[in-house]
Image (spheres, helix red, strand yellow):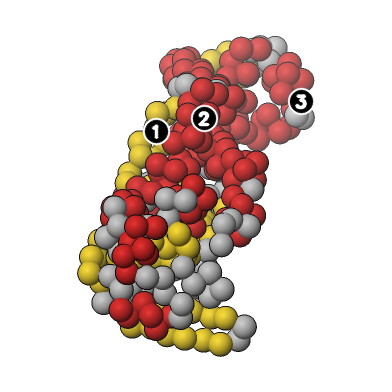
C-alpha cells in the first residue's frame, strides 16, 4: 500500500482514538482504515495500536511513531505550499542561453518587462554564439537559429523565421561599386561569419535559378555584432540575418545588395528540456518571449523591410 496514505491514516487514528471516527474524517470505510493500519504494522514489524472491545490506545512504539509521522506530514504540507507559492509568485534563477546579437536586440526588452512583473526571478544570461548543450550548461532555456534539435529530450518552440541579407555601407559601395550579379561578390571584400553552416559559400536562388558562390573573407569573425560594426565602418560586404541588420538597412546606414536573390532562411526557436512540469519561471519567460515576437510581428516586418 501507499506509505504516505498509511501515515495519514495512522495519524488520524492516533488523533481520533477510534477507527470509526478516523474513517469518517478520512472519507473511507472502517475496513479500509483497518487494512492500512495492518499494512503499516506488518511493514514495521511492530504493533502501533492496542485495541480492546471498548477502547483504542497507542503502544509506546505507536506514540513515538505518531510524533514522527505528524512531523513528516507537516513537512510535506509545507513543501507543497512552498511550491504552490512559487507557481503563484515565481522565484529562483532562470538560466538563458543566447547569442550576443539576439540578447542585445530581443532578450533585453523581454527581460526588462519580465523582471518588472516577476522581481523575485534572477536572470543568469549565458552568451555564446555556439550552440550550448542544455544539460551540460545547466540552461533552462536557449534561443537557437536552427530548425531541429538532435537531442530528443529537448523541446523546441518556434519564434519566427528570418531572412539572411547581403548588405554594405553606402560609402563602401560608392568606392567599390554595387554588385549586380552574385558572381560580382568575388571582386569584393567579404565579411564572413565563421559559425555559419557553410561560411565559405553562398547559395542564392531567384525564380528557380540556383547559384553557389565561393567566398574568401577579407575579415572572418564568430560574432555578428562585430561584423555588423565592420560593415558600418565600410570594411566590406556583410551576410547576416535580417534581425541583426534590418534596422541599419531601414535607417540607410547599410544598403541591401542583390535584393532579388534569396538566401536560405533561418528559423529562430526556443529550446528547453522536455518536462511534464516546467518551473513556473521558465514557462512564464517562454510565454513572454513568444508574446513579444507576436506583438511586434517581426517576421512580417523583416519580410516587408527595405529592399
Please tell me which residue lies in front, 8 or 176. 176
Inter-mark Cα distance, 3 to 1 = 46 Å
Name the N-terminal-most of marks 2 and 3: 3
Question: Is residue 224 shown to the viewer in this render?
Answer: no
Relative to 132, is 87 on the left or the right?
A: right
Tag 2 near tag 3, CB within 8 Å: no
Helix or strand or loop: what does disc 3 sit on? loop
How far across and down, in percent of the image, does residue 82 sit?
51, 22
How far across and down, in percent of the image, does residue 68 sit?
44, 19
Q: Residue at x 53, y 29 (%)?
A: 113
Q: Which residue is mark 2?
A: 114
Tag 2 near tag 1, CB within 8 Å: yes
Q: Residue at x 30, y 79 (%)?
A: 187
How far across and down, in percent of the image, does residue 218 sit?
22, 69
Name the N-terminal-most of marks 3 and 1: 3
Relative to 141, is 161 on the left or the right?
A: right
How would you rate the neighbour count of disc 2 (Cα within 10 Å): few for under 14, some for 14-19, many for 20 or more?
A: some
Q: Which residue is mark 3?
A: 27
Tag 3 near tag 1, CB within 8 Å: no
Please tell me which residue lies in front, 74 or 16. 74
Q: Which residue is mark 1?
A: 123
Q: Quadrant of the C terminus?
A: bottom right
Amino acid at each position: 500500500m501507499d506509505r504516505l496514505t498509511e501515515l495519514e491514516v495512522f495519524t488520524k487514528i492516533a488523533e481520533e482514538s477510534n477507527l470509526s471516527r478516523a474513517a469518517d474524517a478520512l472519507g473511507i470505510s472502517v475496513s479500509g482504515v483497518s487494512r492500512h493500519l495492518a499494512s503499516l504494522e506488518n511493514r514495521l514489524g511492530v504493533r502501533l495500536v492496542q485495541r480492546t472491545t471498548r477502547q483504542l490506545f497507542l503502544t509506546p512504539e505507536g506514540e513515538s511513531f505518531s510524533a514522527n509521522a505528524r512531523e513528516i506530514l507537516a513537512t510535506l504540507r509545507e513543501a507543497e505550499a512552498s511550491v504552490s507559492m512559487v507557481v503563484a509568485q515565481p522565484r529562483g534563477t532562470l538560466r538563458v542561453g543566447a547569442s550576443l546579437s539576439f540578447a542585445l536586440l530581443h532578450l533585453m526588452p523581454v527581460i526588462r518587462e519580465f523582471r518588472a512583473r516577476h522581481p523575485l526571478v534572477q536572470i543568469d544570461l549565458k552568451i555564446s554564439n555556439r550552440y550550448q548543450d542544455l544539460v551540460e550548461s545547466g540552461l533552462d532555456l536557449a534561443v537557437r537559429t536552427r530548425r531541429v534539435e538532435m537531442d530528443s529530450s529537448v523541446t523546441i518552440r518556434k519564434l519566427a523565421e528570418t531572412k539572411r541579407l547581403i548588405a554594405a555601407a553606402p560609402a563602401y559601395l560608392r568606392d567599390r561599386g554595387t554588385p549586380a550579379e552574385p558572381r560580382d561578390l568575388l571582386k569584393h571584400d567579404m565579411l564572413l561569419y565563421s559559425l555559419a553552416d557553410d561560411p565559405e559559400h553562398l547559395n542564392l536562388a531567384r525564380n528557380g535559378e540556383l547559384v553557389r558562390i565561393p567566398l574568401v573573407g577579407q575579415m572572418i569573425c564568430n560574432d555578428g555584432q562585430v561584423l555588423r560594426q565592420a560593415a558600418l565602418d565600410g570594411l566590406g560586404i556583410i551576410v547576416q540575418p535580417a534581425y541583426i541588420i534590418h534596422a541599419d538597412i531601414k535607417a540607410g546606414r547599410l544598403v541591401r545588395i542583390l535584393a532579388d536573390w534569396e538566401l536560405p532562411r533561418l528559423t529562430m526557436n526556443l529550446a528547453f528540456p522536455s518536462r511534464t512540469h516546467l518551473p513556473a519561471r521558465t514557462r512564464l519567460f517562454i510565454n513572454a518571449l513568444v508574446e513579444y515576437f507576436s506583438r511586434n510581428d517581426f517576421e512580417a516586418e523583416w519580410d516587408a523591410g527595405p529592399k
